[in-house]
Image: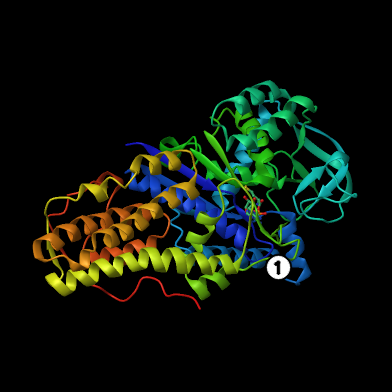
Amino acid sequence: MKKFYITTAIDYVNAEPHIGHAYEKILADVLARWHRLKEEDVFFLTGTDDNAQKNEEAAKKVNKDTKEFVDENAEKFKELCKILNISYNHFIRTTESKHKRIARDIFRSVYEKGDIYKSNYEGLYCTGCEEFKTEKELVDGKCPEHNQELKLIKEESYFFKLSKYRNKLIKLVESKDFILPKEKRNDILSRLKDDELKDLSVSRINKEWGIKTPIDEKHVIYVWFDALINYVSGVDYPEGEKFKQFWPADVHLIGKGINWFHSVIWPGMLMSAKIKTPKTILVHGYLTVNGKKIGKSLGNVVNPKFFVDKYGADQLRYYLIREIPFGQDGDVNEGILKIRINNELANELGNLVSRILTLAEKNFNGEIKKSVLDKKLIDRLNLKKIHDCMDKFELHNALSEIFRFISECNKHINEEKIWELKDKEQEKHLYTLLESLRIISILISPFIPETSRKLNKQLGIKNGLLDECRFGLIKSYKVKKEGILFNKIE
Ligand code: ME8
């Protein structure tokens, strides 16, 4: 059986989750569910980045014990996954003892290889990014991601010989499908080729919070070195069955701001530790409000729970995936969310289901038998295009192609005036339409899983697989209408 291992970034728990976090989890969930529909063995990992200094600083600000504080916030990220129907297989936290042990083991093996040495660091640190910045990266003396002042730090530190792996890294980054979408590769490649690749400071001295390095108790492991390791500790590196089955990861899904860490630093660490590198770093854009990145430190967070409570999880999932072309930034706009709910979910999908089931119940007592398929309608489904879009991670295009077929079904009902047809003639059309609904339900299930579940219930069928997106499989239907799928928003 083919396997598919997908991860999201692990979130900082210095505050509650915002809609950018929700967006990433939804994208990953769609991919995980799609691969399950293809009957692949899927492992989907998400979790929290507990050991960051910014988490400790945030805890101190509210006079809380850091562990208690990160535990509380981590729960909120789990809760977010729950309300969004995120079907992860494991939720990892970097304060777990297993992760800590594995992070120390990897640090040690890189050290024993001779790739970690002690020196001094002097530079500007952005706690928002948890990263040293160069003068060149600053805008008006501030970090452009977080718009905040940097701390000048001058201290003893252990360094990882990242520079040693430069040529191998260039080759990796140049390889097809390593960084996707393709446009996200050039930045990284030019930075690797044009700038001198510096060794990386991988420890911080005299810090209370974090994982102690296995070679010097005075130092904790730099949080990025620690956090990236979650992708292998989450599948029980080095001896676990899951590691053997699932590593290397097929997709690390991340936001564009942390591409360098995933495309350069992480593979460099893996090369040194003699672990295979992941197959694809898949980079999504940022959600913005009035064009500005949404972020805790920028103080313009949008709470995803607000949208879920007000409109529903599937509605939010649909809107975010359909509205924002994968890889690009997208402005969160409640007005457009409402328009999409009304025009596409309620008027197209909801209405289609209601029209078909109403006729089936009224004229056939809900019982529709298999009959000749209506070729004119089934030819309007372009499954290949949907597959191609998914293979290319164009989730927005896949979803829009599915909804194009939904509106073709509505058009077909109008063109053929199906409600005016009699007996067998009408039943024949309804059979093809019910088969269309069954296939639509399979296709939408990764995107709007709750809707698919409700629809299957009304159709009286079980959840299907991609392989069952073929017309004429069901011998007879017994359908039962149960309320409407989507309420219209005033
Ligand atoms: O970066 N729109 O954590 P994080 C879309 N702990 N995505 C966004 C976003 C926005 N406005 N803001 C953030 C970290 N993200 C590290 C990751 S992985 C080993 C460690 C994305 O909480 C962001 O790009 O700041 C990242 O992929 C994820 O949310 C977590 O961000």
Residue 443, image x, y percentages: 35, 52
Percent position (x, y) of residue 185? 64, 33
Let me know if residue 218 appears in the view.
Answer: no
Where residue 67 sits: x, y (%)?
66, 63
- The residue located at (47%, 36%) in the rendering is 247
Q: Is residue 217 left or right of residue 124?
A: left
Q: Quick one: 119 or 380, which is closer to the camera?
A: 380
Q: Is residue 218 left or right of residue 361?
A: right
Tell me which amino acid carries mark 1: Asp
Residue drawn where x is 65% and y is 37% of the image: 107
Residue 70 shows in the view: yes
Q: Which residue is mark 1?
A: 65
Q: Is residue 63 left or right of residue 398?
A: right
In the rendered structure, the answer to whether residue 160 lies left or right of residue 271 reads right
**Picture quarter with the N terminus:** top left
Image coords of residue 385 (percent x, y)? 39, 41
How many labels were placed on the picture?
Answer: 1
Q: Secondary structure at mark 1?
A: loop
Protein image colouring? rainbow
Taking depth in this image into account, of 82 and 27 the one nearest to the observer is 27
Q: What is the quadrant of residue 320 in the picture?
A: bottom right
> Based on the displayed image, in which of its 4 quarters is residue 383 positioned?
top left
Q: Quadrant of residue 48?
A: bottom right
In the foreground, 101 or 33: 33
Q: Residues within 10 Å of mark 1 (few under 14, many from 20)?
A: few
